[in-house]
């Protein structure tokens, strides 16, 4: 659903035929100073079908050239969220980064969600890995 601040903005869309992510644009004009975080408005709210989520991912060009990324990457958009889609950006670069209304700031990947529930038990089965982790198999 287009919100009043989304007037005139493009609906998120794939840039190429087999792109995984739909580019989403900013609905606001801001300058993100080095180290700053900001939930950037997109001007859209959505209802994702049950059984799916949207992952918000950084654009690699912005990350490489300007250090602009998402502190919560990948952001999680729940199927039952009805508020405005916001893109949480952070500037890890050395320079202030101006964002204009309509600039592509992130990409949205729709993904299936497998719901599960935990069952409490007293013992776990043995595996070759056991409790090894965090580099236990070597570098
Ligand atoms: O990058 C993001 C991340 C989240 N959201 C919205 C949609 C999502 O469904 C909701 C909650 O996100 P999340 O579960 O990541 O945040 P939380 O800190 O756990 O908040 P809550 O207690 O509301 O779930 O906020 C966004 O618009 N953009
Ligand atoms: Mg949550």
Image (spheres, helix red, strand yellow):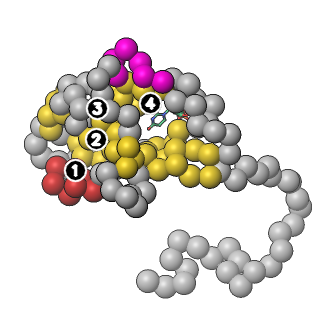
Q: Choose the circle earlier in sequence order: 2 or 1.
A: 1
- In front: 82, or 96? 82
Tag 3: Cα neighbours inside 10 Å, few (<14), some, or many (≥20)?
A: many
Q: How many marks?
A: 4
Q: Which mark is residue 62?
A: 1
Q: Position of residue 68 (x, y in %)?
A: 24, 46
The answer to the question of whether label 4 and label 2 lie on touching residues, with beta carbons closer than 8 A, is no
Residue 37, numbered label: none
Cα distance between the residues tagged 4 and 2: 12 Å
**Distance Cα–Cα, label 1 vs label 4:** 20 Å
Is mark 2 in CB contact (under 8 Å) with mark 1?
yes
Q: Position of residue 109 (x, y in %)?
A: 47, 50
Whichever of labels 3 and 4 marks the residue nearer the N terminus, that label is: 3
Find residue 81 and report its horizontal and vertical position in percent: 58, 29
Q: Which residue is mark 2?
A: 105
The circle drawn on residue 26 is 3
Pointer 4 or 2: first along the chain: 4
SS for tag 1? helix
Does the magenta portion include 4?
yes
Task: Report the front residue among 30 and 14.
Answer: 14
In three-dimensional space, the C-alpha distance between marks 3 and 1, rounded to whole angstroms, equals: 14 Å
Mark 4 residue element: strand
Q: What range is drawn magenta here?
A: 1-6
Q: CA distance from mark 2 to mark 1?
A: 8 Å
Q: Residues within 10 Å of mark 4 (few under 14, many from 20)?
A: some
Element assignment for label 3: loop
Residue furthest front as drawn: 17
């Amino acid at each position: 659903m287009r919100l009043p601040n989304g007037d005139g903005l493009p609906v998120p869309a794939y840039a190429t035929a087999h792109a995984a992510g739909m580019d989403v644009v900013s609905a606001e004009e801001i300058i993100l100073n080095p180290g700053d975080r900001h939930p950037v408005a997109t001007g859209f709210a959505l209802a994702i079908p049950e059984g799916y989520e949207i992952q918000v991912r950084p654009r690699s060009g912005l990350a490489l050239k300007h250090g602009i990324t998402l502190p919560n990457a990948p952001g999680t958009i729940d199927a039952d969220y009805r508020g405005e889609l916001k893109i949480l950006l952070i500037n890890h670069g050395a320079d202030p980064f101006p964002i204009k209304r309509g600039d592509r700031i992130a990409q949205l990947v729709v993904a299936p969600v497998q719901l599960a529930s935990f069952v409490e038990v007293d013992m776990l089965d043995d595996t070759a890995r056991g409790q090894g982790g965090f580099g236990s198999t070597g570098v």
